[in-house]
Image: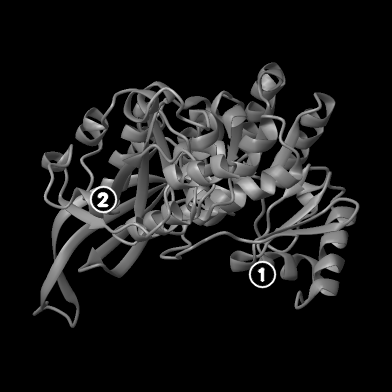
Amino acid sequence: MQTLKSSTPKILVVGDLMIDHYLWGSCERISPEAPVQVVDISKETTVLGGAGNVINNLVALGADVSVSSVIGDDSNGVELKNMLKSIDVNSDNIIVQNKRKTSKKSRVIASSQQVIRYDKESKDDIDNSSVSKILDSLVGSISQYDIIILSDYGKGVLRDDLCEGIIDLSKNHNIKVLVDPKGSDFSKYRGAYLLTPNKKEAILATNIDIKDDKTLKKALVKLKEECNLGLSLITLSEDGIATFDKEVEVFPTVAKEVFDVTGAGDTVIASIAFALSTGKNIQETAKFANLAAGVVVGKIGSATVTLQEIEEYEASLHKSRSDSHIKSFEDINTIVNRCKVSGKKVVFTNGCFDILHVGHVKYLQVAKSFGDVLIVGLNSDQSVSRLKGPTRPVNIAQDRAYILAALEAVDYVVPFEEDTPHDLIKMIKPDTLVKGGDYKGKDVVGTEFAGELKLVDFVDGKSTTKTIEKIQSC
């Protein structure tokens, strides 16, 4: 994840741009003019749609994004370009074609229910002049890109000759082209590095009913051979991602809760492009894309995902390295703010945790049960020495933190230098502060910053001091 965080790949998206327009309101009566609902509009929002959703996902991940497309000479086209400008996307290679309508899909939402959708767009192929302009501009700029995405929504931008021209030009510069395909004929994408069809799209394109491992491999092989791909890939929804190079590999999904799959395909191709462009192999890339999809399907509507969210999600699954759970004050502040925005309950406790034993583990398990995210403040070596004496700690802070972070109950570990975690608790403002049962009747540091205080009894006879005494008596 650190490699991804330090990278800013340059990625070009070519495809069908559109505006997703929403009119939000409520309905309390039927029109006297016709048997239809009367919606009282209270809010109006717009977001980038189509290839624009791929762009949004790339920007959220931290890529330097450029876009090439064709729009109409209309007010929707002006609005779309302004939306791209607002997120710092280079739109110099967007071609304006006379008499073409810029795609805008308007949805009327009444009490969370879509009532109607009306579209204003052109769906016919772009003209020859637009194709030439896109290819001509790419000739002079292609060397600056790390990867190119073709996002096909079937609205006429990605003509066969345009796809072929981009793929040929990219091959001459050793640049990978990734395609989110449309339709049942993938021949126009021949020579791309990979396609990202879902299972249904792959079945239509290969005419192979994918129902088991054997038919999955057959479809993957057929895609790779017929489309002359670098490798083939099929997304399998809740079953993850399947790839084929020399053999089939299936990477299981990691979604915990699925609220909405809208736009998940855009997130997948964006995250695959981002990871590949930073030098990740296909195994690392597929796992990363699964994590990104796992985050985005837990959100409502077409959504994006950040590297920070993916890292936190991976940590919540306990599939990440222990050291990725060890955070600084600055890191944990960002994480806590995000947790609170999403409605998660934050629990905090602290201690020296010198020689980890069953008493510690059971105590932390109980602490985690009080909320969604458990943060453990860990005394530094100097702090432990001041509290416990010059012979302590037995284990250095780095080792103690690593072992704590490996526990399933612990989400994050934050080392602190002071004798008490006062400043850390003040910053976190946990919903629940947890301390040992021996604090009953005593003042607990940081209580004023917490929503509630919970005292948890220790396991009788289990302590670091007793463990050390037993070792010394042997």
| Residue furthest bottom as drawn | 35
Tell me if mark 2 has few (under 14), some (14-19) or many (20+) residues whose alpha carbon lies within 10 angstroms of its own: many
Q: Quadrant of the C terminus?
A: top right
- Indicate left or right for 11 with 357 as reference: right
Residue 178 x %, y %: 70, 42
Q: Give the numbered dot on residue 434.
A: 2
Which residue is located at x 51 percent, y 51 percent?
407
Q: Nearer the viewer, residue 379 or 294?
A: 379
Front residue of this view, candidates 414 and 388: 388
Q: Nearer the viewer, residue 232 or 77?
A: 232
N-terminal label among 2 and 1:
1
Q: Position of residue 197 (x, y in %)?
A: 68, 58
| Residue at 73%, 65% in the rendered image | 202
Q: Quadrant of the N terminus?
A: top right
Q: Is residue 206 above or below residue 384?
A: below
Q: Nearer the viewer, mark 2 or mark 1?
A: 2
Q: Rounded to the nearest whole Å, what is the CA distance between mark 2 and mark 1?
A: 50 Å
Whether residue 167 appears in this view of the structure is yes
Q: In this orientation, which residue lies closer to the viewer: 330 or 97? A: 330
Element class at badge 2: strand
Q: What residue is at 17 percent from the left and 45 percent from the top?
A: 450
- Answer left or right for 280 relative to 114: right
**Which label belongs to residue 35?**
none
- Residue 1 is left or right of residue 426, and the answer is right
The kind of residue tagged 2 is Val
User: The disc labelled 1 sits on which kind of residue?
Assistant: Lys
Residue located farthest toward the front when viewing the structure as drawn: 473
Q: Is residue 120 visible?
A: no
Quarter of the image holding residue 185? bottom right
Return the residue at label 1: 200
Indicate the position of residue 437 as horizontal and vertical percent values. Answer: 24, 54
Task: Give the structural element (helix, strand or loop) at label 1.
Answer: helix
